[in-house]
């Protein structure tokens, strides 16, 4: 019988038997340190600022990694005081690191008293050369009109790919365009910026894919002429007309796929001249939005409630506080519409629905595949309106009815609702009906809806 030539330790391990000494030796092996420098550098750069610097004490193998890895600075006054970086910490880190920079995130609320000069000094530090991501988020509750951004923020224009400014006053740059050849994502929230400066900023963004402009002031009109922009999110809650966005003109946007309105309860005129890939629109609110397609001769277009223009490309639509008559009309304006999200119907309209829509039963050619109806209470008005889709949507795959109060999981109530909706007589034999809680249903936050282009339907609600 042949005798194994393997060492006793290897034979024991192969048989699943590990001696105490061998176990101790295996535990002492630092497997992470065996990774290549490039991988370890990526790990270090993704850690919070303090933790990244502390990796130097792990072993001699790690000492050079922090200084050679792209710097990731996260100044956030989080709830954990042990992990909180002070302004002094950041100044020391920037002085010790040779660069380049990868990401700078500064979130101000308690650190409100950091001076503009201190921020300017950080931004001028060589440790931040070649910065890829920049987020400066002031607190609008403490700085209602924003804090001025140093002009030094513009020194990263040639390398930045992601930019977010919150409650800031943008430096004047209206004299010439700012070249930002790598910028793909731009967010401006509660930012004061002139129309000329905003135009100069956008003109220089040649690969910009997503843009979110929310509750800013300083530009009454927004003009979009971008060959790369795919997603545009806009919104304003300012009541003062001279402080808010009033007009949007999409002059030439061959890649634009989605136009999203966030927290917009004031009138905005929208003119879409050229956007051949435009397919996702919402959330439209009653008379707040007025549209004109294909011309800029007049920005006073038709309101959502009276729109008559046929736009074949729109496939996903979200509505709120829109009259039922307008909903039926919009399905004619968007003949290829596949998904419809109806957030709210005015109370007075719900009362008037009792005897109105049953007359249209079976007479409409509705091509929707998915319908979501929040705030469904199961009253006669709700049932009659929902039955429009049950009895007329011949391609329907699913209808989701979100319940604001009770009855979730009440099988007897659900069976009765299915009977009242006459789902057995549905136009689409494969359609499915779901009764879910509106409390547990939510859409992605605006930043994700606009910037995460992997989300094919930004209004998709998760339970």
Image (cartoon, rainbow, N blue to C red):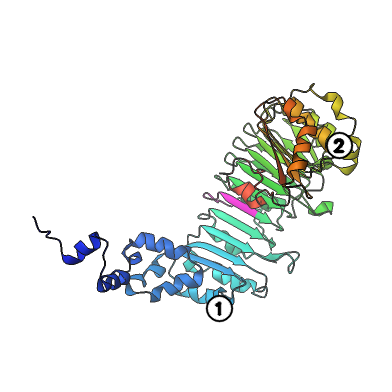
Q: How many marks?
A: 2
Where in the figure is residue 123, as x and y percent of width and height? 55, 67
In the rendered image, residue 182 lying in the magenta stretch gets the answer yes
Q: Quadrant of residue 141?
A: bottom right
In the rendered image, residue 128 lying in the magenta stretch gets the answer no
Answer whether residue 145 is visible to the viewer in this image. yes
Q: Quadrant of residue 5?
A: bottom left
Overall secondary structure of the magenta stretch? loop
Callout in the foreground (1, 2): 2
**82 versus 17 height, above or below:** below
Label 1: how many Cα within 10 Å (few below 14, some 14–19, many 20+):
few
Name the residue at the left extreme.
1
Answer whether residue 171 is visible to the viewer in this image. no
In-front residue for pair 222/267? 267
Q: Where are the magenta residues, as a range?
A: 178-187
Where in the figure is residue 177, as x and y percent of width and height? 60, 50
**Label number found at residue 88:** 1
Distance between mark 1 and mark 2 Cα atoms: 62 Å
Q: Secondary structure at mark 2?
A: helix
Residue at 62% x, 50% y: name it: 448
**Side of 327 where 69 appears, left or right:** left
Residue position marked by numbered label 2 in the rendering: 381
Residue at 74% x, 46% y: name it: 410
In-front residue for pair 434/125? 434
In-front residue for pair 10/76? 10
Where in the figure is residue 191, as x and y percent of width and height? 70, 58
In-front residue for pair 428/129? 428
| Quarter of the figure that contains the N terminus | bottom left
**110 versus 312 height, above or below:** below
Residue at 20% x, 66% y: name it: 9
């Amino acid at each position: 019988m042949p005798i194994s030539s393997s060492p006793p330790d290897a034979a024991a391990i192969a048989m699943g038997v590990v001696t105490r000494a061998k176990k101790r030796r295996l535990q002492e092996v630092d497997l992470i340190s065996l990774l290549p420098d490039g991988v370890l550098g990526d790990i270090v750069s993704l850690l919070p600022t303090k933790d990244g610097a502390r990796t130097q004490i792990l072993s001699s193998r790690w000492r050079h990694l922090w200084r050679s890895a792209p710097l990731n600075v996260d100044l956030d006054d989080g709830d954990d005081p042990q992990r909180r970086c002070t302004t002094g910490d950041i100044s020391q880190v920037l002085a010790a690191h040779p660069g380049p920079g990868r990401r700078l995130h500064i979130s101000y609320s308690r650190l409100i008293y950091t001076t503009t000069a201190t921020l300017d000094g950080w931004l001028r530090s060589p440790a931040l050369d070649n910065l890829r991501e920049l987020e400066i988020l002031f607190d609008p509750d403490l700085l209602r009109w924003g804090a001025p951004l140093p002009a030094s923020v513009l020194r990263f224009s040639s390398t930045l790919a992601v930019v977010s400014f919150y409650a800031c006053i943008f430096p004047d740059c209206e004299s010439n365009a700012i070249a930002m050849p790598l910028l793909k994502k731009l967010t401006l929230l509660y930012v004061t910026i002139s129309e000329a400066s905003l135009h100069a900023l956008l003109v220089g963004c040649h690969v910009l894919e997503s843009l979110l402009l929310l509750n800013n002031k300083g530009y009454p009109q927004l003009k979009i002429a971008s060959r790369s922009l795919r997603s545009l999110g806009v919104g304003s809650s300012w009541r003062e007309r001279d402080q808010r966005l009033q007009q949007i003109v999409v002059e030439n946007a061959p890649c634009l796929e989605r136009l999203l309105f966030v927290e917009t309860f004031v009138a905005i005129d929208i003119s879409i001249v050229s956007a051949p890939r435009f397919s996702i629109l919402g959330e439209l609110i009653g008379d707040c939005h007025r549209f004109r397609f294909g011309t800029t001769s007049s920005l006073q277009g038709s309101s959502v409630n009276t729109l008559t223009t046929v736009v074949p490309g729109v496939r996903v639509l979200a509505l709120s506080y829109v009259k039922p008559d307008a909903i039926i009309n919009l399905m004619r304006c968007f003949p290829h519409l596949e998904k419809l999200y109806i957030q709210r119907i005015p109370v007075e309209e719900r009362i008037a629905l009792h005897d109105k829509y049953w007359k249209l039963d079976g007479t409409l050619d509705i091509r929707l595949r998915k319908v979501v109806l929040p705030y469904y209470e199961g009253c006669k008005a709700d049932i009659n309106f929902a039955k429009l889709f049950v009895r007329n949507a011949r391609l329907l795959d699913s209808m989701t009815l979100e319940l604001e109060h009770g009855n979730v999981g009440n099988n007897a109530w659900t069976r009765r609702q299915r009977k009242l909706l006459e789902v057995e007589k549905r136009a689409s034999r494969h359609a499915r009906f779901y009764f879910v809680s509106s409390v547990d249903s939510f859409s992605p936050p605006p930043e994700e809806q606009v910037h995460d282009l992997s989300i094919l339907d930004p209004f998709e609600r998760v339970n």
